[in-house]
Amino acid sequence: MPSGESFFITTPIFYVNDVPHIGHAYTEVAADVLARWHRQAGDDTWLLTGTDEHGQKILRTAVANGVEPKQWADKLVDSAWLPLLETIDIANDDFIRTTEPRHEDAVALFLQKLYDDGFIYAGEYEGYYCVGCEEYKQLDELDTPTEGEYAGQLVCRIHSRPVEILKEKNYFFRMSQFTDALLDLYETQPDFVQPESVRNEIVQFVRQGLSDLSISRSSFDWGIKVPWDPSHVVYVWFDALLNYVTAVGYGTDDEQFARRWPAYHLVGKDIARFHAVIWPAMLMAAGLPVPRKVFGHGWLLVGGEKMSKSKLTGIAPQQITDTFGSDAFRYYFLRAITFGQDGSFSWEDLSARYQAELANGFGNLASRVIAMVGRYYDGALPAPAGYTDADLAIQRVVAKAAADADDAIERFAINEAIAAIWTIVDELNGYITEQEPWVLAKDEATRARLGTVLYTASEGLRALATLLAPIMPIATGKLWAALAGEGHGPLAEQGVREAGTWGVLQPGSAVSPLEPLFPRIEDVADTGAA
């Protein structure tokens, strides 16, 4: 996208019925990397995340813990969800809670508009309801186990728990009216839903024809009151989806809303249907623009199963960051998994990649180059004395890596972007091995060549610091400071799209010592790096 354009990206808002696991953190980090990249490219960037605090699931959890729902939500947000953002270094611009007046008031305004315009009517509904999903289920979305605790019962395929049969008077949204409009949207904007596997599933679902959507509940009262009938509360998904517009001024700040909306939505593939079917239909009914894109990423698998709080397979992010640090957490999950597909987590793979790619690959490269500038030039960056084919090859690799990474980010292919950037790490390590600067340093006759080699390696590190800053902000911040980067302004202001331009570092500038960016794991506790 051209620099300066609006880039508004959202994560889902997460249920506060329990503490976050690495599946939640995976979504947060992916959205943060995309936001940091666009921010660093000069785009008008806004990252929104938050919590979903209404609905039957929250009510039951609160009751089970002997507190009011709002007390439960306050406790979980303060003790778990906000600290998560610090643990994994999320630079969000806003954090919305669905219990905030700015959200509740705007939801009522939106709902009243749809009611006044004839898109909402009263009716009665009976169906299979999964409290875990907060959703009515069709029979083809349920399983009937033949053994175990729930043998013979209809259970939710996602939560593996029995569904309930609910019958109640509800208000309905005329979603069936938008079947053709949605199919037209998917056809005219093929990248509206991504990746392709999720898009195909959504199109197939809508082609079967849409039913009207029950959007209120009268069997419990924890939610936003329906403005014309306070005996009903708004269906939690209808309420939650609206956070994306209520957070940027819908109904209260027209200027902010016009500046930010529409957004890019990053979600888990299991909730893509809500975002790619129900949500755009709601917006169409209200006469508002649909989102720019809905990207449904894959699941994190542990032992072959989707990570889940209900199945006790959740791993707390801090279990990883306490040992490996937040940079390694961010790098690993976005490098090791093809973004958009499912991916398996293992401690062994994390540890192996930390050692091979971060400690030995990137970290050791940075340490060696900085140390040689200190040793051979007293910490003053040498000037290049004429480039050979080997040096020019590095310049081409850097330029191509920057362009390829930006192209991949535009497609939300974060793992491809990191792979493109990593070509610089691999090429520089090979370059230093071939050029042998420690040998060049022994002879005054090759002093000029030594200067060119170390300048080339330092410029390569400068590009790496710039391009990897959105992914690993802590390590790259240290590297930037060591390279005298602060003389060129803060790292966060270095344009990623210009990172491949050669010759940014000024010869003669002071290069300072660099501590290991990725200490050996057994040394982490001693160095305080984690």
Image (cartoon, rainbow, N blue to C red):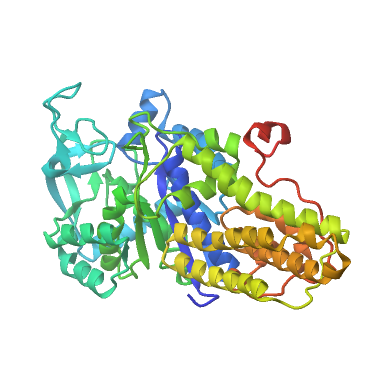
Tell me which corner region of the image, top left, top right, bottom left or bottom right, holds residue 146. top left
370 relative to 329 in the view: left or right: right
Tell me which corner region of the image, top left, top right, bottom left or bottom right, holds residue 277. bottom left
234 relative to 251 in the view: left or right: left
Instruction: Return the x and y of residue 325 as percentages of the image width and height.
Output: 60, 41
Along the viewing direction, whichever of 157 and 126 lies nearer the viewer? 157
Along the viewing direction, whichever of 519 and 116 lies nearer the viewer? 519
Instruction: Return the x and y of residue 80 as percentages of the image width and height.
Output: 51, 36
Identified at 27% across, 41% down, the residue is 134
387 relative to 144 in the view: left or right: right
Identified at 51% across, 66% down, the residue is 405
Relative vertical location of residue 117 with respect to residue 470 in this rendering, above or below: below
Instruction: Return the x and y of residue 133 as percentages of the image width and height.
Output: 28, 41
Along the viewing direction, whichever of 376 and 76 lies nearer the viewer? 376
Quadrant of the rendering where the C terminus is positioned = top right
The reply to whether residue 151 is in sight is yes
The reply to whether residue 49 is in sight is no
Relative vertical location of residue 181 with respect to residue 123 in this rendering, above or below: below
Along the viewing direction, whichever of 384 and 260 lies nearer the viewer? 384
Instruction: Return the x and y of residue 226 as percentages of the image width and height.
Output: 29, 49
The number of numbered discs placed on residues in the rendered structure image is 0
Identified at 59% across, 48% down, the residue is 358
Identified at 61% across, 73% down, the residue is 393
Relative vertical location of residue 260 with respect to residue 23 in this rendering, above or below: below
420 relative to 463 in the view: left or right: left
